[in-house]
Amino acid sequence: MAMAIFCTMLIIQLMLTRSHDAQEVARNLNRIESRVGEIDDDVLNLEGRVNSVELEAPRQLQKEVDPLYAEVEVIGSLVKQMAEAMADMEEQIEDQGLSLEETRRRQMALPAQPQQQLGLSHSASSQGVEPSHLQSRSSVDSAQQPVQQPASQSAAYSAMLEMDADATLEDMALSNNNQSEFNMASDIRSAIDASRIDLYLQPIVSLPQRRVRYYEALTRLRTVDGRILEPIDFLSEAERIGQMPAIDNVLLFRSLQILKRLSSRNREAGLFCNLSPSTLVDDSFFPGFLEFIKANEAFSDLLIFEFTQANVAAMGLLEHESLAALAEFGFRFSIDHITDLRMDFKGLADKGFRFAKLNAARLLQQDETLTHGNIHPADFGSLLKRYGIELIPDHVEVESTVLELLDLDIRCAQGFLFSPPRPVRAEILQGAPSPRARTTA
């Protein structure tokens, strides 16, 4: 009986202990559930705050950026006024050029008169000495003194003549330079107004097959007398007078015409289109430029916008925002005229740059103007490939260069060896609008 009672009490004690443990576990679960509910409430509050920040941040950013845009517009208007004032000054300088040259000529002619008077006095004194044989030696010496004194004056006048001649040559060189710049500016404006902007294409071929993979679109301007202006002739002057956006606008329109014609023939060849940074920040051109790009978003895989390394290095916040706007539509970028391999190419890849052009002579170390730092030029292509950028050597002119490029695992190249830039037929480019007409519209 004692053993039975003991076992019964042991079983009762065990059941009470288990129930107590079960109640403790239930209480712990209830506390955990309450904490989880509190965390859910905190997460909901955090989501609400994040949503409010996401909605408020663009508004706040817009409030801060709007004054900056207003200041940029004011600065742009001031720059345009300064450009117009400079153009007026150039015209005035051209008008006054003839009068300045005449004044210089008169100043050069004035010192010649004392020399003529010197010659007359010398002849008169010689005529006065020869007939009188009774004059003494002292009188002859005194008669010769006036002749020797003007000789020093003649040297001084000759020195003055040389100084005036040097100053005149410098003024003439300066005036000729200003005149040439004025003539170039007028040729550029007249070519744009008359739509004398020609499009040239140079192929970029694959190696070693040498099949056309891309084209590069190049612009040429024709003057009234039929001269062809190369980009090296007019680019700097067009930048100075603010005409590059108009040229780039025509280049873009005609490049899309070429792409449409190639696609109609089932030829999937990309096109490199050179742009100026001034086009990206021009208030009158870039909005329409962006709208035109958006309407032709289907060609984003075939149209590549190209910039020089110097222009990319000088880009500011507004230029990078414009590049980001173009990248949102799927367009890619290229950098050419590379002279420094120490640039942040990984950062360029993050901004949409997918191609890089380097002179073949610099890549093969035949040109010492390349700054490579710790990067060997032979490894430059592999470095860019890791960033998703394809290296395209240009200015390839001899067959031996192709063999060396193949040793470096280069798959595309450009140069006169494959083809020089060739003009596009006029019937293909019919219907190109006037850039000024689209600007006013």
Image (cartoon, helix red, strand yellow):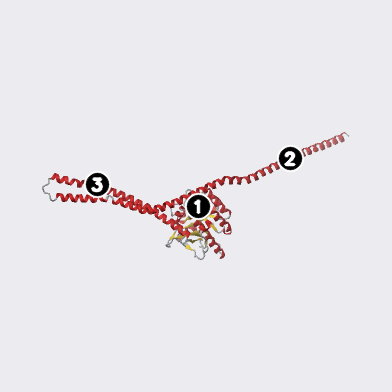
> From this viewpoint, is residue 30 visible?
yes
Instruction: Tell me whether the residue at label 3 lies in contact with that at label 2, contact meaning CB atoms closer than 8 angstroms.
Output: no
Residue type of the residue flagged with mark 2: Ser
Q: Name the residue under label 1.
A: 278
Q: Earlier in the sequence, mark 3 or mark 1?
A: 3
Along the horizontal axis of the image, is 108 left or right of 224?
Answer: left
- Nearest the viewer among 294 and 196 is 196
Residue type of the residue flagged with mark 1: Ser
Q: How far apart are marks 3 and 1 (CA)?
A: 59 Å
The C terminus, quarter of image:
bottom right
Residue 19 numbered mark, or none: none
Numbered disc 3: secondary structure = helix
Question: Which mark's residue is nearer the viewer, 2 or 1?
Answer: 1
> Which residue lies most toward the left here?
134
Q: How crowded is mark 3: few (under 14 residues within 10 Å), some or many (20 or more)?
A: some
Along the horizontal axis of the image, is 70 left or right of 369?
Answer: right
Q: Where is residue 1 in the image (x, y as percent from the top left)?
A: 89, 34
Q: Residues within 10 Å of mark 2 (few under 14, many from 20)?
A: few
- Nearest the viewer among 17 and 7 is 17
Numbered disc 2: secondary structure = helix
Question: Which mark's residue is nearer the viewer, 3 or 2?
Answer: 3
Q: Mark 2 points at which residue?
A: 34
Q: Name the residue under label 3.
A: 153
Q: Where is residue 19 in the image (x, y as percent from the top left)?
A: 80, 38
Residue type of the residue flagged with mark 3: Gln
Q: Position of residue 147 (x, y in %)?
A: 20, 47
